[in-house]
Each structure stands twice: as structure tokens, then as C-alpha cells.
Image (cartoon, grey):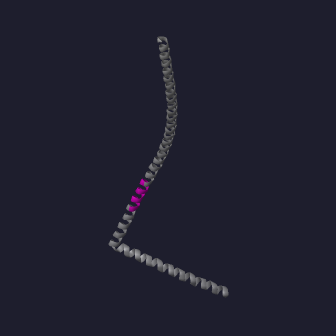
Amino acid sequence: EAELKKVKEHNIEAQVNISKQAAKLSAKMNAIKKVLKDPDLVEGNVSRLESQVAFQAERDSMLENITELQKKVTVAEGEARETNKKLYTLEEQLLQTEDQVRQVREGLDHKEALAEETMKMAEDNLIRTEIKLFEATRERDI
């Protein structure tokens, strides 16, 4: 009897649940029938769906554009990296060239100083030689 009672209670619960689900389905069916009977509501739903489809298409198009732009940005970033590498190489070459120019200038400055010193020594020797020549000429004349 207890088991029979449990089965009856279970059946009653199942019937209540079925009744609730039937009521919900009936309410949905009535709402659908109401919408289908009212052309303005149908037109409004169709317009809303068309708007959603148009919006989705526009969104998809924007996503494609964004993807293309991302690809272009990636390419531009790669080109920028290559350009930066080239600039770095050119900067290194410029620094080396400037260093070479500095070394050449230092060498020229050193050679110029040696040339000035040699010239001074030559002038001094010329003056001494002229003095000796003058003294020799004077002694001879005396």
C-alpha cells in the first residue's frame, strides 16, 4: 500500500508538472497566434529581424576590415623593424666614418705641426747660414 501511495503521489506530481508545461505551451501558442493575427506585429518583427541581419552583415564587414587593417599593421611593423635595422647600421657606419675623419684630422694636425717645426728649423738654419755667410764675407772684405 505504501508503494502504491508513492506511485499515486508520483503520478499526481507528474500530472501537475504536465499541466504546468501544457499551460506554458498554451500561453506561448496564444502569443504566437496573436502575433500572427496582427500584421503590424508581424511586420515589426520582420523589420527587427531585417535590421538585425543588416547589423550583423555590417558587423561582419567591419570585422573583415579590422582583420585587413591588422594584417597591414603587421606588415608595416615588419617594415619599420627592417628600416630601424638599416638606420642602426647607417648610424654605426656614420660613427665609424666620423672616427676615421677624426683620426685623419689628428694625423694631418700632427703632420702640420711637424711641417711647421721643420720649417722653423729650416728658417733658423737659413738665418745661421746667412749670418755665417755675412761674417765670412765681412772677414774676406777686411
57, above or below 77, in the image: below
Farthest left residue in view = 40
Q: What residue sits 52% from the left and 31% below the top? A: 110
Secondary structure, magenta segment, majority class: helix
| Image: magenta residue range | 55-65
63, above or below 20, in the image: above
- Please tell me whether residue 57 belongs to the stretch shown in magenta: yes
Farthest bottom residue in view = 1
Left or right: residue 11 versus residue 101 is right
5, above or below 43, in the image: below
Residue 28: image location, x then y, percent: 44, 76
- Please tell me whether residue 6 belongs to the stretch shown in magenta: no
Residue 57: image location, x then y, percent: 40, 59
The quarter of the rendered structure image containing the N terminus is bottom right
Q: What residue sits 45% from the left and 78% below the top? A: 26
Left or right: residue 120 versus residue 3 is left
Q: What residue sits 37% from the left and 64% below the top? A: 51
Residue 63: image location, x then y, percent: 43, 56
Closest to the observer, 52 or 31: 52
Closest to the observer, 106 or 77: 106
Q: What residue sits 40% from the left and 74% below the top? A: 32
48, above or below 21, in the image: above
Closest to the observer, 103 or 34: 103
Q: How many marks?
A: 0
Residue 59: image location, x then y, percent: 41, 59
